[in-house]
Image (cartoon, rainbow, N blue to C red):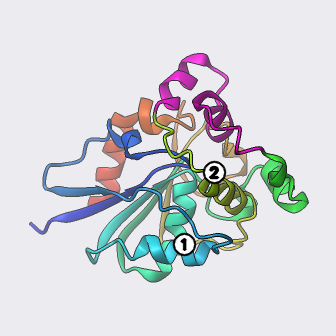
Amino acid sequence: MEQITVYFIPGMAAGPEIFKNIRLPKEYRVEVLEWLIPEKDESLKAYAKRMADRVKKPNSVLIGVSFGGVVAQEMKQFLKLRKLIIISSVKTRSELPRRMRVAGFTKAYKLIPTSVVLSAEDLTKFSVGPKSKKRLRLYQEYLNVRNKQYLDWALKRMVTWDRVSKVSGVIHIQGDEDKVFPLKYIQECDVIKGGTHIMILNRASEISRRLIRIIEE
């Protein structure tokens, strides 16, 4: 059996540790593409090309979480993939919640003080959105990319994402209790009942089973 290489991209500001509970068959080769620090004013396309250059295995699987799902979709134009899967993410600008679209249109993202919003708790509240203290604690230890240039860039690229038609072949797994990207805005996805924006951590067994099924279909 040929070895399947699976590349993961974490969510905004998150490190590879968010995938620690994902279990894939031992014959899979798993790599996490950690965030690069963007160049000043780098376009999303240029950044996606740099990320894609690190995918060395052809016919691999690319899986992105949240903002990592957005970047993964932009990477696809530079790659020949076996499967493209996004989790807790969006496929087009129309799937962004209204507050994000408004922030992009009004440039309100410029008012977010990323130089001071670097504590784990503040960053978690912004990027994850849960109100539960338990969920905040669960996720905040994994948000370890605190570089201001990266955060400024990522926030802007997320709320100003201009994709209007979905990338062909993308498979979308979404929780019906995701408060960052609410299900009511999402079209055509595989729904995890009770799944929140941090389900990659606390619903990892179910997500692992779905990933295996999708990859081997």
Mark 1 burial class by Cα count in 10 Å: few <14, some 14-19, many 20+: some
Label 2 is placed on what type of residue? Lys
In the image, which residues are magenta?
Answer: 113-141
Extreme residue toward the right, this view: 106
User: Could you give the CA–CA distance between mark 1 and mark 2, rounded to whole angstroms?
Assistant: 16 Å
Q: Residue at x 66, y 60 (%)?
A: 153
Q: Quadrant of residue 53?
A: bottom left
Residue 177 seen from this side: no
Quarter of the figure with the N terminus: bottom left
Percent position of residue 145, x then y: 51, 46
Mark sitting on residue 148: 2
Secondary structure at numbered mark 2: helix
Quarter of the figure with the C terminus: bottom left
Q: Which residue is mark 1?
A: 47
Q: Is residue 146 left or right of residue 182?
A: left
Q: Is residue 179 left or right of residue 27?
A: right
Q: In the displayed structure, would residue 21 be above or below residue 93?
A: above
Q: Are marks 1 and 2 in contact (CB under 8 Å)?
A: no
